[in-house]
Image (cartoon, rainbow, N blue to C red):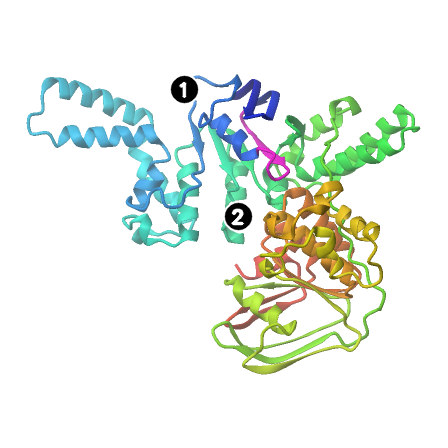
Amino acid sequence: MLQVNDVFLQFGGRKLFEDVNLKFTDNNCYGIIGANGAGKSTFLKILSGALEPTRGSVSVGKNQRISVLNQNQNDFDDCTVMRTVLMGHKRLVEIMDQKDALYCKEDFSEEDGILASELETEFAELGGWEAESEAASLLNELKFGEEYHDKLMGELDGKQKVKILLAQALFGNPNILILDEPTNNLDAKSIMWLENFLLDFKNTIIIVSHNRHFLNKVCTHICDVDYGHINMYVGNYDFWYETNQLLAKQAREANKKAEARAKELQEFIARFSANASKSRQATSRKKELEKLTLEDIKPSMRKYPYINFEFEQELGKDILTVEGLTKKGFFEDVSFTLQKGEKVAFLSDKSINVSMLFDILMGIEKADSGTFKWGKTVNLSYVPQNFDDFFDGVQLSLVEWINQYAVKDHTESYLRGWLGRMLFSGDEAKKKACVLSGGEKVRCMMARAMLQGGNFVILDEPTNHLDLEAITALNKGMINFKGGMMFASHDQELMQTVAGRIIEINGTKTFDKLTTYEEYLELTE
């Protein structure tokens, strides 16, 4: 158990948290969500003891061990893979090192013998004799066989290091597990393995993640970091989001009687419980959900961008034909045809391959051989993965920047309306384009794409740099879009809810099927 008591944190004149009181208990998984910059990772540092709050305290149960996912991939470059995993249990490794040092002494004294006996006892109590076997099992499940055990971490690539550090955090059955963005740089199958591991984990889990599919699968509670306060909700991310949407709608219907609003909430909870998957949060939390009242739920104050791709000209029958397209170093002999209404997700072991394909289809790059032809009725909107050229060194205000892409109306009120959709209101619209953050740039690119009014949209990793609110809004916009679409994304929820066809390109086209993302994962196991 971990308890937060009256925590207040201030940096300079900025209050980050105020009067935070929370209790995290065993057999539960808590997802920490909030806008970019709200302080989610900072809150994890307070929970782990890495950062002292300005006021208040964090208490941990007696003899309970906290394990934290290390964020620095290079911290253990001089250690072997096996030792790196074992270092997830610091006290255990300390004992192992002390024992080795004692037994190497030439003048082994009686005092040394007493100390060695004490260390052996503690070593056994901490499960030391099974430690390497457990570590090896974790590594094996993450596809690292014995040949990796004695390799130095410095010999591995970034994606391999991430998996080893994940094994380090999970090792030794910690009482409290704190994971900051654990799915970053993990492939889909490793994420599925992690989901199953956490669903079977009986202690306390606290997670920060932008992966909504992951949060929905593993979380029993959501903690919303909202303007300095942190509110805890029963249920997963979808339940939190849909509940807040319902409360926001009810707030706009102020005349509706409290009884009617309470009945609407209970009906929603009943539907959500019935439709939820049979994972842990859907079963063990059902009774708690059914007891919720309007007074139990505090609506979030955060705002969502409005993303809605609209177009005037309907698509004809012919959309896109690609024949034998080759770009040396990226792909060879790629052929496919797109039909009206298709939303196609493109996958590759190297995302740069898909980016190159999209750039070729947009006329930005040239293929070495092969052809492609767009239908006569197709109007394109494109959000590339690399959009720095649109902003670097650009001294235009955002109003002036978006005006470059306006077609029908160039009035400031019209342009500010589009920026307002993307949460740039008031003085925010006067910002210089060159000073925007990554997430702000993506929102501007979305506004640009919507202004273009394309009936076919190409999106290359559009969730990069976005917070959960913007990702959720984008996902909704992509689902509702009535035109054609090609996209690439590492966001599982977006892939599953939008794509009706999957095309995989590794060297050449290796997979092409009308299928959902989850079915694709099953087919390619």
Query: What type is the residue that disc 1 sits on?
Result: Asn
Question: Which element carries disc 1, helix, strand or loop?
Answer: loop
In the picture, residue 449 is in which quadrant? bottom right
- The magenta segment: 25-39
Mark yes or no: residue 8 visible: yes
Q: Estimate the spatial distance between the alpha carbons at disc 1 and disc 2, rounded to whole Å.
A: 30 Å
Q: Position of residue 332 (x, y in %)?
A: 52, 77
Q: Residue furthest left?
A: 107
The residue lying toward the viewer, choosing from 131 and 439, is: 439
Asked if one can make out residue 275 in the rendered structure from this viewpoint, the answer is no
**Which of these two is toward me, 352 or 427?**
427
Q: Amino acid at mark 2?
A: Ile
| Residue appearing at x 58%, y 77% in the figure | 366
Residue 80's label in the rendered image is none
* Local crowd size for mark 1, using a 10 Å CA cut-off: few (<14), some (14–19), many (≥20): few
Q: Position of residue 459 (x, y in %)?
A: 66, 60
- Local packing at callout 2 (Cα closer than 10 Å; few below 14, some 14-19, many 20+) is some
What residue is pinned by disc 1?
63
**Residue at (30, 41) in percent of width and height:** 83
For marks 1 and 2, the one nearer the N-term is 1
Percent across and percent down for residue 431 are 67, 47
Q: Of all residues shown, which one is farthest toward the front? A: 395
* Viewer-side residue, 483 vs 356: 356
Q: Which mark is residue 191?
A: 2
- Magenta run includes residue 396: no
Instruction: Report which quarter residue 8 is drawn in.
Output: top right
Q: Would residue 292 be found to the left or right of residue 60 on screen?
A: right
